[in-house]
């Protein structure tokens, strides 16, 4: 038994077989539910859990659903384009706030691992220097490798259920083609040919999607693809019941009695509404998730999806309700609303039987967990701990919910690749960390963890190299190649500039002495002129001076003139010193040395940047990709299905309670 640190700290994990056995004991009838927004990322991996359940003799249903009631990703832009979509990379600058789920793609070895500005700065990168010579370089420098997400350019993005397949498919298809081509480039020789055959199989069943009369929605196509993708990725026939949230959570006078609506009933029933809203607000406190007051008076944490009108927050009043769709809709009640049945009747009477009642952030899980066991990958759904806190508060207030636990699955896809027989051509960011361009899959499986550790250590080492000369010496010692000569050249330039610096230090020392001398002479001159003035008033002005008096005045005059001469000489020497410095620093040779040194420092920083990028991709990026791999990678890399089977067989699980 291993221990993994996920949402629940130090939660012990067990094998898939042990987890399913425990699940059979505590929730024997509940179907497994895999709910995602796309079929092109990690969701089809969960078919492996269904296959394992069947092999163990369990009859539990497996339901795969498309979460089509969530909003399609939005790209914040000043130039909105209605009905248009665009594939974008994720970086820490122009697309920092990008979130894409319904159109997310990652190529083999790739993941949504942004190389943050903080990571670059911590590793010593001189960001300001690079920005001066390469404006906007940070856009590319921080980009996640091997990942793209499709986003809507609409000012108000639609929910996935309302996205036209014809409008979005060209961008989705071109992005999928990019991901497949990038993945095939990671295979070599016969392995690539085998992978190409598998992509032909993939595109064969995708071709049917092109037959579209303009009425299909994206969710329709995704739902049709669920069984096909499960079969393609696992290499086995699977018994899948496909659905989507607009079907699962269809809300009308016939469906409102289903257990999945027990949680919203607590927020709608007049006797429990206050307790429920209090529990929700307490659970989101300090999380950054809006409390209900942010949504307006009477708001509850549920949205109503109305066909052709959109999705909006439900706000309940005494004799009516507002649905905050893009164009708000209204319900009226003859008497104050008391129960879910009355609300369902009002919704159906006004909008028909095909509306969907969907929970916001915290509440969706509690709705569907009444009847299903969610299958979540490690790290999926950051709201679970808050949902659990809300459920616990509801129970403490006398309103417990009987919820099935979440089945958490942790994959180690790269370790499982030890059964693979393919010959890999590593993508460019992994070649320097692994030290090779080509390697067998088994070798990759053995080495990737140690490489990741080495790359993390490299990031720590780079953080210590703050001086350019230290970085260049490090590159000479660790990278070699042309850096051997460049390091020697930099040392020569550094020595030449050190000689210059010695001369400049000498001139600065001389100038300091001259400034001190000028200050002293000025003070002496002031005293001498004062003595001369005093003597003039005492012995000469309106007096009859003696010969001695006139001699003394002459002496005092000479003393002042001598000090004036000393001051002028010191200032002349000062000007000469500045002139010599200007001649030194402005000489063509010195300027050339400075320019060459700056060039070498820039080259060194660019090399540091590349080392940082590769290190992050080969450590954090690989780890993230291995925990949540795109399911369609498996048949490309391992057409015999061994990699997929081993990944499922070696997965670690735990059951996460929701109350």
Image: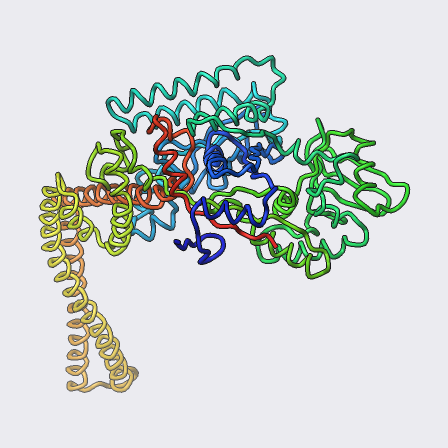
Q: Is 30 placed left or right of 250 in the picture?
A: left
Is the N terminus in the top left, top right, bottom left or bottom right quadrant? bottom left
Q: Is 390 placed left or right of 527 in the picture?
A: right
At 16% from the left and 43% from the top, the residue drawn is 479
In the image, residue 334 sits, relative to residue 294, either above or below, namely: above
At 38% from the left and 34% from the top, the residue drawn is 644
Q: Quadrant of residue 637?
A: top left
Q: Is 602 placed left or right of 367 in the picture?
A: left
Q: Residue 228 appears at what percent x and percent y?
A: 49, 24
At 68% from the left and 57% from the top, the residue drawn is 279
Judging depth in this view, the residue of 78 and 622 nearest the camera is: 622
Is the C terminus in the top left, top right, bottom left or bottom right quadrant? bottom right
Count of residue discs: 0
In the image, residue 445 sits, relative to residue 280, either above or below, namely: above
In the image, residue 355 sits, relative to residue 471, either above or below, namely: above
* Residue 177, visible in the rendered structure: yes
Q: Residue 508 appears at what percent x and percent y?
A: 17, 62
Judging depth in this view, the residue of 430 and 570 nearest the camera is: 430
In the image, residue 621 sits, relative to residue 657, either above or below, namely: above
Q: Is 309 placed left or right of 64 in the picture?
A: right
Q: Residue 538 appears at what percent x and percent y?
A: 27, 86
Q: Residue 148 appears at what percent x and percent y?
A: 43, 32
Q: Quadrant of residue 489?
A: top left
């Amino acid at each position: 038994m291993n221990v993994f640190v996920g949402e629940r700290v130090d939660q012990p994990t067990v094998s898939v077989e042990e987890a399913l056995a425990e699940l059979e004991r505590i929730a024997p009838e509940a179907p497994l539910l895999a709910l995602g927004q796309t079929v092109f990322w990690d969701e089809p991996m969960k078919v492996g859990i269904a296959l394992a359940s069947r092999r163990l003799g369990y009859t539990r249903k497996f339901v795969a659903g498309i979460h089509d009631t969530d909003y399609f990703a939005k790209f914040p832009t000043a130039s909105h384009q209605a009905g248009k979509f665009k594939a974008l990379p994720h970086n820490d600058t122009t697309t920092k706030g990008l979130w894409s789920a319904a159109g997310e793609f990652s190529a083999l070895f790739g993941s949504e691992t942004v190389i943050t500005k903080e990571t670059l700065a911590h590793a010593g990168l001189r960001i300001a220097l690079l920005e001066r010579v390469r404006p906007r370089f940070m856009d590319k420098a921080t980009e996640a490798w091997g990942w793209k997400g499709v986003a809507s350019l609409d000012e108000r993005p639609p929910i996935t259920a309302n996205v036209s397949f014809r409008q979005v498919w060209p961008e989705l298809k071109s992005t999928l083609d990019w991901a497949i081509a990038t993945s095939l480039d990671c295979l070599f020789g016969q392995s690539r040919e085998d992978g190409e055959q598998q992509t032909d199989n993939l595109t064969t069943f995708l071709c049917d999607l092109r037959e579209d009369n303009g009425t299909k929605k994206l969710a329709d196509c995704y739902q049709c693809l669920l069984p096909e993708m499960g079969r393609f990725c696992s290499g086995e026939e699977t018994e899948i019941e496909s659905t989507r949230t607009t079907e699962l959570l269809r809300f009308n006078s016939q469906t409102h009695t289903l257990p999945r609506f027990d949680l919203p009933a607590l927020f709608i029933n007049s006797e429990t509404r206050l307790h429920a809203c209090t529990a929700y607000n307490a659970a989101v406190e300090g999380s950054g998730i809006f409390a209900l007051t942010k949504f307006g008076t009477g708001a509850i944490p549920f949205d109503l999806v109305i066909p052709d009108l959109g999705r909006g927050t439900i706000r309940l009043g005494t004799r009516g309700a507002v649905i905050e769709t893009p164009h708000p809709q209204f319900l009226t009640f003859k008497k104050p609303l008391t129960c879910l049945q009355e609300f369902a009747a009002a919704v159906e009477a006004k909008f028909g039987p095909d509306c969907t009642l969907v929970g916001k952030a915290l509440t969706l899980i509690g709705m569907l967990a009444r009847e299903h066991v969610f299958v979540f990958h490690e790290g999926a759904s950051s709201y679970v701990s808050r949902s659990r806190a809300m459920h616990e508060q509801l129970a403490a207030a006398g309103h417990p919910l009987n919820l099935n636990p979440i089945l958490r699955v942790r994959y180690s896809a790269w370790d499982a690749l030890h059964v693979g027989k393919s010959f890999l051509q590593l993508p460019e960011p992994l070649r320097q960390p692994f030290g090779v361009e080509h390697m067998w899959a088994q070798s990759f499986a053995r080495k990737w963890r140690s490489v990741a550790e080495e790359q993390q250590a490299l990031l720590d080492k780079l953080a210590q190299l703050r001086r350019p000369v230290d970085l260049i010496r490090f590159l000479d010692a660790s990278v070699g190649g042309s850096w051997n000569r460049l390091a020697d050249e930099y040392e020569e330039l550094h020595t030449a500039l050190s000689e210059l610096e010695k001369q400049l230090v000498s001139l600065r020392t001389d100038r300091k002495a001259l400034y001190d001398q000028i200050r002293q002479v000025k003070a002496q001159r002031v005293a001498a002129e004062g003595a001369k003035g005093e003597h003039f008033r005492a012995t000469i002005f309106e007096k009859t001076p003696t010969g001695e008096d006139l001699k003394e005045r002459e002496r005092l005059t000479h003393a002042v003139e001598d000090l004036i001469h000393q001051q002028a000489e010191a200032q002349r020497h000062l000007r000469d010193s500045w002139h010599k410095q200007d001649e030194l620093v402005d000489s063509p040779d010195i300027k050339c040395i400075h320019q060459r040194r700056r060039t070498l420092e820039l080259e060194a920083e660019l090399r540091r940047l590349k080392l940082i990028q590769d290190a992050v991709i080969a450590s954090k990026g690989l780890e993230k990709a291995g925990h949540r791999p795109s399911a369609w990678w498996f048949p490309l890399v391992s057409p015999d299905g061994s990699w997929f089977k081993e990944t499922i067989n070696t997965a670690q699980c735990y059951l996460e309670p929701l109350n």
